[in-house]
């Protein structure tokens, strides 16, 4: 067994690592879940004739999401490479980027709270700033997971986890011990942390506008929303300070040694990551997983609230254009039910994370097959939600069928997230370019998000559950790529799904 590459990884470092995912996801869920209501109450774009599709709010949300991901896709590889470059200089790139990204989110939230008054250019400007902050925060999670996976941190001393942190695999009939650390548990606990962040957001942050109106009846919904964004801004600032103080930073000499060339040019590091991605099939499979995982996360955050919002307009409970949501015959109940339904998906994701972590660490299943299973589950949930008990004009989100399939989608969501992260962070021969690989991982996730937000937003204006049908197709794509991966790498898969796929670096 090889010696740990990253030493001195403390329990507090590990807590900060998980808190980063918690904080970032809670802010993302808040913004995406409140966006339909923000557009109506703050920007002033209201549905016409009592139906959401007549105002093209779905199209607007899709356009904002497309712009968000355009910024994310451009910045993700650049920020990832910046991490690698900072490491070559001994500055701890992941720590600096992840903590400063929360400050960038705070700036965006301040703009939403105080400055935004028009869709163009105000909302697009601050949505772009928000996208930059989210990209910096989330793209570093895979980098830190890689550091954790090859650090001296271990759960072996804890009673509730008795598995060995390292796995011996059989190659050509001989038992050999390799430095493949079981990181399914780390990915699973990160999944739990992000799930808790989402649940915390829908229960504490998303309901803030309604609570402000309960506490201060003289305040209308417009200012209740603005004040809520200020509260979340304060949360982002405090989170940034916590992460800067407690995130792990590798010894500068170790970072420089890992990078091999201390003064390697920035764009050469970016090129190295791109060339590695072109030939390494394990990285490619992780990227496809990111495509499905990120699109699922955003679809549940955006289109579940939109589906609820549409239904309440159809039954006539959101026709009051005064902006006073204190009355019961407005979107007050719709706002609350939107948080409930989104919370169901996130709760299922939270409680199922340990199961996915177990499957990843199980030598008979492993991270590759776990990705395939979660893709299949996602296809069932999304096609079920979009095709059963529905029509092109109406969909009742309060049915048992809806709750069932939303739960299945939440189950798939966390499986896709932690299996794809585990696949990428488990590449042991790429520490010096892991930031770049994480950037390309986020880039591929961004492609999925752009498609689900832009095409899904257009579909939603005509078929409110259309985005989930599209998401089902994404899951089938992920499953198909896995099957191709198995066919091309049958020898590797047969010796243990968690073994490194380092001997298959020919062009895919």
Image: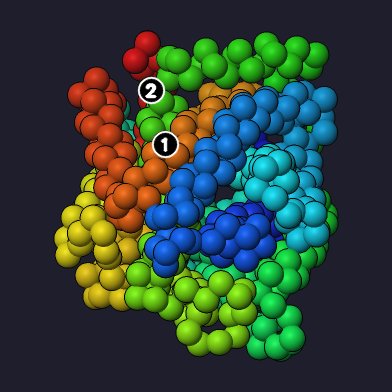
Note whether residue 44 is visible: yes
- Tell me: 410 left or right of 490: right
The local crowd at label 1, few if under 14, some if 14 to 19, many if 20 or more residues have their Cα within 10 Å, is many
Residue occupying the point 42% across, 64% down = 49
Query: What is the x, y in percent for residue 1?
Result: 51, 36
Q: Which mark is residue 451?
A: 1
Q: Nearer the viewer, residue 202 or 219?
A: 219
Q: In the picture, residue 414 is in which quadrant? A: bottom left
Residue 236, compared with residue 504, is above or below; it is below
Quadrant containing the C terminus in the rendered view: top left
Q: CA distance from mark 1 to mark 2?
A: 24 Å
Q: In the picture, residue 289 is in which quadrant? A: top left
Task: Classify mark 2: helix, strand or loop.
Answer: helix
Residue occupying the point 62% across, 79% down = 324
Q: Nearer the viewer, residue 207 or 391?
A: 391
Query: What is the x, y in percent for residue 391?
Result: 20, 59
Query: What is the x, y in percent for residue 209?
Result: 65, 75
Residues at discs 1 and 2 in contact (Cβ within 8 Å): no
> Which of disc 2 and disc 1 is earlier in sequence?
2
- Tell me: 192 left or right of 174: right
Q: Which residue is mark 2?
A: 281
Residue 481, compared with residue 376, is above or below; it is above
Task: Classify mark 1: helix, strand or loop.
Answer: helix
């Amino acid at each position: 067994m090889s010696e740990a590459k990253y030493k001195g990884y403390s329990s507090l470092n590990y807590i900060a690592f998980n808190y980063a995912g918690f904080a970032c996801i809670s802010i993302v869920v808040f913004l995406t879940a409140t966006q339909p209501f923000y557009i109506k109450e703050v920007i002033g774009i209201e549905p016409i004739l009592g139906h959401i599709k007549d105002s093209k709010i779905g199209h607007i949300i899709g356009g904002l999401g497309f712009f968000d991901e355009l910024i994310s896709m451009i910045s993700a590889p650049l920020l990832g490479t910046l991490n690698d470059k900072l490491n070559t200089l001994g500055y701890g790139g992941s720590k600096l980027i992840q903590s400063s990204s929360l400050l960038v989110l705070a700036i965006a939230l301040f703009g939403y709270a105080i400055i935004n008054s028009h869709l163009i250019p105000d909302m697009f400007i601050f949505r772009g700033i928000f996208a930059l902050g989210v990209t910096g925060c989330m793209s570093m999670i895979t980098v830190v997971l890689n550091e954790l996976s090859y650090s001296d941190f271990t759960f072996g001393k804890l009673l509730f986890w008795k598995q060995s942190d390292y796995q011996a695999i059989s190659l050509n009939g001989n038992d050999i011990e390799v430095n493949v650390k079981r990181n399914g548990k780390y990915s699973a606990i990160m999944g739990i942390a992000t799930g808790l962040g989402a649940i915390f957001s829908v229960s504490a942050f998303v309901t803030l506008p309604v609570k402000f109106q309960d506490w201060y009846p003289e305040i209308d919904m417009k200012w209740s929303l603005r004040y809520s964004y200020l509260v979340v801004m304060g949360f982002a600032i405090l989170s940034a300070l916590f992460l800067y103080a407690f995130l792990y930073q590798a010894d500068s000499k170790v970072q420089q040694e890992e990078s091999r060339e201390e003064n390697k040019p920035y764009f050469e590091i970016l090129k190295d990551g791109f060339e590695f991605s072109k030939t390494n099939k394990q990285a490619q499979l992780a990227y496809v997983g990111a495509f499905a995982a990120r699109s699922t996360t955003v679809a549940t955050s955006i289109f579940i609230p939109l589906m609820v919002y549409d239904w309440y307009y159809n039954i006539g409970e959101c026709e009051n254009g005064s902006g006073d949501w204190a009355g019961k015959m407005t979107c007050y109940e719709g706002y609350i039910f939107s948080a409930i339904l989104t919370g169901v998906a996130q709760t299922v994701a939270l409680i199922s994370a340990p199961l996915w972590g177990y499957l990843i660490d199980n030598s008979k299943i492993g991270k590759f097959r776990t990705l395939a299973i979660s893709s299949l589950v996602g296809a069932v949930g999304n096609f079920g939600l979009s095709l059963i008990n529905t029509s092109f004009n109406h969909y009742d989100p309060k049915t048992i069928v809806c709750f069932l399939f939303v739960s299945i989608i939440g189950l798939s969501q966390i499986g896709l997230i932690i299996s794809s992260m585990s696949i990428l962070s488990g590449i042991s021969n790429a520490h010096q370019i892991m930031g770049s690989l994480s950037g390309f991982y986020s880039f591929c996730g961004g492609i999925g998000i752009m498609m689900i937000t832009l095409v899904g937003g257009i579909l939603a204006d005509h078929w409110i559950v259309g985005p989930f049908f599209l998401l089902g197709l994404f899951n089938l794509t992920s499953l198909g790529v896995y099957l191709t991966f198995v066919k091309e790498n049958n020898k590797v898969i047969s010796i243990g799904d968690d073994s490194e796929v380092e001997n298959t670096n020919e062009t895919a």
